[in-house]
């Protein structure tokens, strides 16, 4: 899903560059090039999908590990 979204964003910026022409100049730097836009989307989605559940998973794994050692 992350790859599909980032490739789609990169291609969208390349095919329809007028889509982001209404953005401020500071954001147009990120959306003027398809590779940059795709990379930014990939990084943001990786942070969203991979960073938060990892903490929950670690807690579950550690709690299961501690319970096995106590018994």
Image (spheres, rainbow, N blue to C red):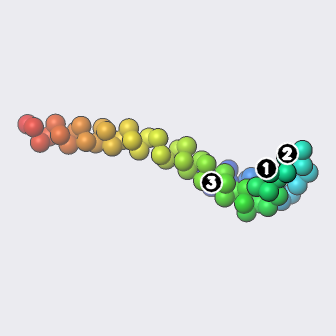
Q: Are marks 2 and 3 in contact (CB under 8 Å)?
A: no
Tell me what residue is drawn at x 30 percent, y 38 percent.
60
* Residue 37 image point, x, y percent: 73, 56
**The C terminus sits in image quarter:** top left
Describe residue 68's horizontal placement relative to residue 8 as left or right.
Answer: left
Q: Nearer the viewer, residue 20 or 71?
A: 20
Q: Are marks 2 and 1 in contact (CB under 8 Å)?
A: yes
Q: Nearer the viewer, residue 65 or 20?
A: 20
- Which circle, 2 or 3, is nearer the viewer? 2
Where, by quadrant of the figure, is residue 33 drawn? bottom right
Describe residue 31's horizontal placement relative to residue 40 as left or right.
Answer: right
Residue 42 marker = 3
Q: Are marks 1 and 3 in contact (CB under 8 Å)?
A: no
Residue 27 marker = 1
Q: SS class of the residue under badge 2?
A: loop
Q: Residue furthest left?
A: 71
Tell me what residue is drawn at x 25 percent, y 42 percent.
62
Question: How far separated are the C-alphas under marks 1 and 3?
Answer: 17 Å
Q: SS class of the residue under badge 3?
A: helix
Tell me what residue is drawn at x 55 percent, y 50 percent.
46
Residue 49 visible in the picture: yes
* Residue 47 image point, x, y percent: 54, 47
Q: Residue furthest front?
A: 26
Tell me what residue is drawn at x 39 percent, y 41 percent.
55
Question: Which residue carries the number 2 mark?
Answer: 23
* Residue 17 image point, x, y percent: 88, 55
Q: Could you tell which of marks 1 and 3 lies nearer the N-terminus?
A: 1
Question: How far separated are the C-alphas under marks 2 and 3?
Answer: 20 Å
Mark 3 surroundings: few (<14), some (14-19) or many (≥20) residues within 10 A: many
Describe residue 25's horizontal placement relative to residue 49 as left or right.
Answer: right
Where, by quadrant of the figure, is residue 15 drawn? bottom right
């Amino acid at each position: 899903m992350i790859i599909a979204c980032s490739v789609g964003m990169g291609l969208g910026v390349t095919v329809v560059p007028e889509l982001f022409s209404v953005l401020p100049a500071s954001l147009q730097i990120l959306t003027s090039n398809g590779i940059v836009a795709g990379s930014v989307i990939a990084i943001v989605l990786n942070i969203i999908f991979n960073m938060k559940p990892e903490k929950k998973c670690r807690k579950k794994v550690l709690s299961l590990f501690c319970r096995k050692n106590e018994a």
